């Protein structure tokens, strides 16, 4: 028996396993029901009483070592297997990350700004919460002009001479530009505007405008007409014609409204242009001398023109989307139509 115990001690010392399976096989071989150590335990019963103590100790030690050794082999095999097997399957296709796209209003706003930038205009921005002075007073609005009423304007504070309000047009940025910039001035002013209107297919309480202003010596109505014609052709195509209809704005004199030839029916008359062949795109005019004076510019030396257009209006004409509300609802089905419409 002594030799058998020593033999197993030696074998345990040299035992190796290259896999979990081999380690398990070794356990069965030594410690299984019919294992070598189990067999020795059986045999121990027949050992002479004077040898029991010595052999008993040896056998216990052997069993302990065998258990420890097999445990160690199992752990080693597990670690080796984890190293060989990658934790993730690198050949799996990646999770798709859908790319966002720009909003149609942003695309058109950018196109308008880019066209005027090519003509040499700078870009100016101003606050959305404005005061009465910059939105109305300095733009020559008479004290009782209906645009100043609560029905049209969202007031932030009332009850004093120069109340705060949400700007109803970006013409306020004209005033801020004339106050702060040196002459000559050539700017476009894109931004959000707010009006107290019921929301419908044709009106919204928030929308976007781009205002334009050019002030220098000897600026004439012909310059205005040329700038707008060039803009219209860049925006709607080289065949586009414009026409001007006399109009009224407090801040321009004379004032006009600009139509472009309908790019759907090319003047023949269709649903979009309501049979007229023309589509209204903006208001414009020569800056009123009172407006120049209010910002400290001498109307005897300088003259200028201004224009203002609605970005959603241009977008509606460009893409024939006839319900303004689409531009504010952020329905992905609508927005994704414009994912590739980024060309100027
Ligand atoms: N501010 C006008 C509006 O909100 C648009 C406009 C008309 C701007 C004529 C101008 C202009 O600069 O000359 O309806």
Image: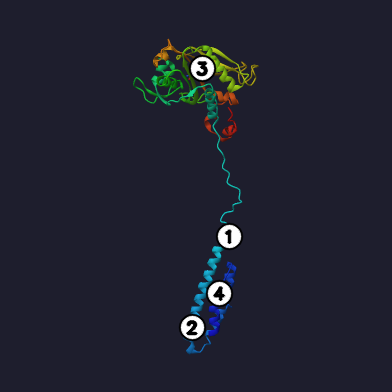
Q: Are marks 2 and 1 in contact (CB under 8 Å)?
A: no
Q: In the displayed structure, would residue 81 be above or below residue 289?
A: below
Label 2 secondary element:
helix
Residue linked to disc 1? 84
- Mark 3 residue CB less than 8 A from any atom of ligand 1: yes
Q: In the displayed structure, would residue 190 be above or below residue 96?
A: above
Mark 2 or 1: in front is 1
Of the image marks 4 and 2, the number of the one nearer the N terminus: 4
Q: Position of residue 98 (x, y in %)?
A: 57, 40
User: Residue at point 54% right, 69% down?
Assistant: 73
Mark 4 or 3: in front is 4
Q: In the displayed structure, would residue 89 be above or below residue 66?
A: above
Of the image marks 2 and 1, the number of the one nearer the N terminus: 2
Q: Position of residue 159 (x, y in %)?
A: 34, 22
Q: Residues within 10 Å of mark 3 (few under 14, many from 20)?
A: many
The colour scheme used here is: rainbow
Residue linked to disc 4? 14
Q: Is residue 106 visible?
A: yes
- Whole-number angstrom distance, CA of label 2 to CA of label 1: 43 Å
Residue linked to disc 3? 283
274 or 315: nearer the eye?
315
Q: Are marks 2 and 3 in contact (CB under 8 Å)?
A: no
Q: Residues within 10 Å of mark 1 (few under 14, many from 20)?
A: few
Residue linked to disc 2? 56
């Amino acid at each position: 028996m002594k030799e058998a115990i020593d033999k197993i001690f030696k074998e345990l010392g040299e035992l190796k396993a290259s896999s979990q399976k081999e380690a398990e096989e070794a356990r069965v071989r030594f410690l299984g029901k019919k294992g070598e150590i189990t067999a020795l335990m059986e045999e121990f019963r027949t050992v002479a009483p004077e040898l029991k103590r010595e052999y008993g100790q040896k056998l216990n030690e052997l069993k302990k070592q065998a258990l420890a050794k097999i445990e160690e082999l199992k752990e080693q095999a597990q670690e080796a297997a984890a190293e060989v097997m990658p934790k993730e399957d690198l050949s799996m296709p990646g999770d798709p990350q859908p790319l966002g796209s720009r909003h149609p209003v942003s695309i058109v706003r950018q196109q308008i700004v880019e066209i005027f930038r090519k003509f040499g205009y700078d870009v100016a921005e101003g606050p959305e919460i404005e005061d009465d002075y910059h939105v109305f007073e300095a733009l020559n609005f008479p004290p009782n002009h209906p645009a100043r009423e609560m029905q049209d304007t969202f007031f932030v504070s009332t009850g004093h001479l120069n109340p705060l309000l949400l700007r109803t047009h970006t013409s306020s940025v004209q005033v801020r530009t004339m106050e702060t910039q040196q002459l000559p001035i050539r700017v476009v002013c894109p931004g959000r505007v707010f009006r107290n209107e019921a929301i419908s297919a044709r009106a919204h309480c928030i929308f976007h405008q781009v205002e334009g202003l050019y002030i220098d010596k000897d600026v004439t109505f012909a310059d205005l007409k040329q700038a707008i014609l060039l803009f219209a052709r860049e925006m709607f195509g080289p065949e586009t014609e414009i026409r001007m209809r006399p109009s009224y704005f407090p801040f321009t004199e004379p004032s006009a409204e600009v139509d472009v030839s309908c790019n759907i029916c090319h003047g023949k008359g269709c649903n979009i242009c309501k049979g007229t062949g023309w589509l209204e795109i903006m208001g414009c005019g020569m800056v009123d001398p009172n407006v120049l004076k209010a910002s400290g510019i001498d109307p005897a030396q300088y003259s200028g023109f201004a224009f203002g257009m609605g970005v959603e209006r241009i977008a509606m004409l460009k893409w024939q989307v006839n319900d303004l509300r689409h531009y504010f609802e952020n329905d992905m089905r609508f927005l994704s139509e414009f994912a590739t419409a980024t060309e100027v």
